[in-house]
Image (spheres, rainbow, N blue to C red):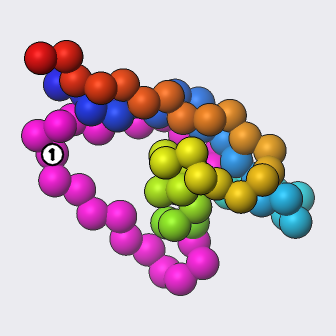
Amino acid sequence: MTAIQITHLSYTYPSQAEAIFIDLSLDLDSSWKMALVGRNGRGKTTFLRLLAGQCPEGREQPPRQRENEA
């Protein structure tokens, strides 16, 4: 079952001209184990903040989250 669904996420930091995420779509299944890896300053924390609705102010389309139905 899909635990989190992201559809067409785009985000640009307020101080940047180019977007860090462009049209990102992703379905995360509740049974999957995932790791978010990458070099420093590549957007890992920003991605998690966007998921949590705690992103810094910028131009964005918020992710859509969906709870599993029992």
* Residue 38 percent coordinates (x, y): 44, 74
Is residue 15 shown above or below 66? below
Q: Closest to the observer: 67 or 32? A: 67
Residue lying at 87% horizontally and 66% vertically, measured from the top left:
15
Is residue 55 shown above or below 6? below
Q: Magenta stretch containing residue 8, yes or no? A: no
Residue at the limit of the structure toward the bottom, as seen here:
40
Q: Secondary structure at mark 1?
A: loop
What is the quadrant of the N terminus in the image? top left
Q: Report whether 9 appears left or right of 4.
A: right
Residue lying at 67% horizontally and 41% vertically, measured from the top left:
10
Residue at the limit of the structure toward the top, as seen here:
69
Q: Three-letter amino acid code at disc 1?
A: Trp
What's drawn in magenta, residue-wise? Answer: 21-42
* Residue 13 percent coordinates (x, y): 77, 59
Label 1 sits on residue: 32
What is the quadrant of the C terminus in the image? top left
Q: How many marks do you count on the picture?
A: 1
Residue lying at 54% horizontally and 35% vertically, measured from the top left:
63
Q: Report whether 17 appears left or right of 61.
A: right
* Residue 69 percent coordinates (x, y): 19, 16
Residue lying at 49% horizontally and 46% vertically, measured from the top left:
51
